Amino acid sequence: MKRHNFSAGPCVLPQEVLAKSAQAVLDFDNGLSLVEISHRSKAFVDVMEHARALALELLGLEGMGYKALFLQGGASTQFLAVALNLLEKRAAYLNTGTWSDKAIKEAQIFDDVTEVASSKDANYNYIPKGYDIPSDHDYFHCTSNNTIFGTQIKDFPECDIPMVCDMSSDIFSRTIDFSKFDLIYAGAQKNMGPAGTTLVVVREDVLGKVSRKIPSMMDYKVHISKGSMFNTPPVFPVYTSMLNLEWLKNKGGIAAIEKENEKKAQLIYSEIDLNPLFDGFAAKADRSTMNATFTLANDDLKDSFDSMCLEAGINGLNGHRSVGGYRASMYNALTLESVQVLVEIMSELERKA
């Protein structure tokens, strides 16, 4: 039976990427496994260099002073690394959910933080708008897509200070002028590859301006100078992420996948709005194309709906405890067919009720 994987992370990956990465574990370099060769070997150095180049190419940032890094520690480590590398006096943060809230707490360890706006008052079901970004701060930080709550920034603000964005759950999913950002970071496991590596894309000229000493493992300049090889990199997640970026490029890049993602989002949100048995959680203007959050209007139907989903091979649909209900994560590799299966079950539940 075909499985339909709506898991919020680790994400669904293309079958051809899974097949190639599995083969590489068995035989990657003349009878040697990917996970047993030296990370200093030419075979893997080529992988790392290609993965970094692909990231910049797909984001449209080649030749613009940016460097791409594949690091360890997840996006949560970048909450700390961003502050260490960029925060000198004061930073501005937009609070749109759990992960931006955690990023704020890490930055507060070092210096003052201004929370320019927050949607915490409504359990983060919308994106604040019309806020001011202080021009005398070191940087502005935002989270592009909120996996838990199903909201997404549609229009990024204009600001005259460096802009940092956590794009963990929607990177490579939609066309954006990525040159607006001075630093982007994203845990691979939401829309790029297996857990274990984090992509950091940084414009070099924003670095080296803080007075503090930065531990080597947290210093972006150190990792840039070593080509993401300062310490042993997570070879399997980097390799699989490279394969996934190649898959995306071959499909036509971000512009092509954006069209597919919009079709998937339109399909499920239309059902949520038309079906009286379901209620959408996020404000309509701020709905995420990656994570559709919704609840049942009548909890008595939960067992029936869950059984129908299980029978159809649907996996990973349960919502986060902060919201409850359900969350359909529709990352790049999830097919329109999978969303159609879910929508048909939602429609069938209405017919039976």
Image (spheres, rainbow, N blue to C red):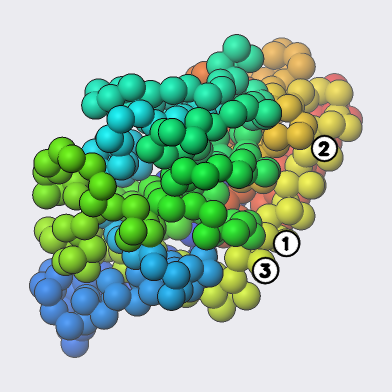
The residue sitting at the bottom extreme is 30
**Vertical position of residue 109 compared to residue 344: above or below:** above
Residue 270 in which image quadrant: top right
Residue 35 lies left or right of residue 149; in this view the side is: left
The residue beneath circle 2 is: 271
In the rendered view of the protein, which quadrant contains the N terminus? Answer: bottom right
Q: Residue at x 60, y 59 (%)?
A: 177
Marks 3/1 in contact by CB < 8 Å: the verdict is yes
Residue 182: where, in percent of width, then height?
A: 43, 53
* Mark-to-mark CA distance, 3 and 1: 6 Å
Residue 86 lies left or right of residue 230; in this view the side is: right
The residue beneath circle 1 is: 259
Q: Residue 110 got which mark?
A: none
The secondary structure type at the circle numbered 3 is helix
The residue beneath circle 3 is: 256
Residue 279 in which image quadrant: top right
Amino acid type at image mark 2:
Glu
Label 1: how many Cα within 10 Å (few below 14, some 14–19, many 20+): few
**Vertical position of residue 347 compared to residue 105: above or below:** below
Q: Earlier in the sequence, mark 2 or mark 3?
A: 3
Residue 342: where, in percent of width, then height?
A: 71, 42
Amino acid type at image mark 3:
Ala
Residue 242 in which image quadrant: bottom left
Q: Residue at x 70, y 14 (%)?
A: 299
Q: Earlier in the sequence, mark 1 or mark 2?
A: 1
Q: Residue at x 67, y 68 (%)?
A: 256
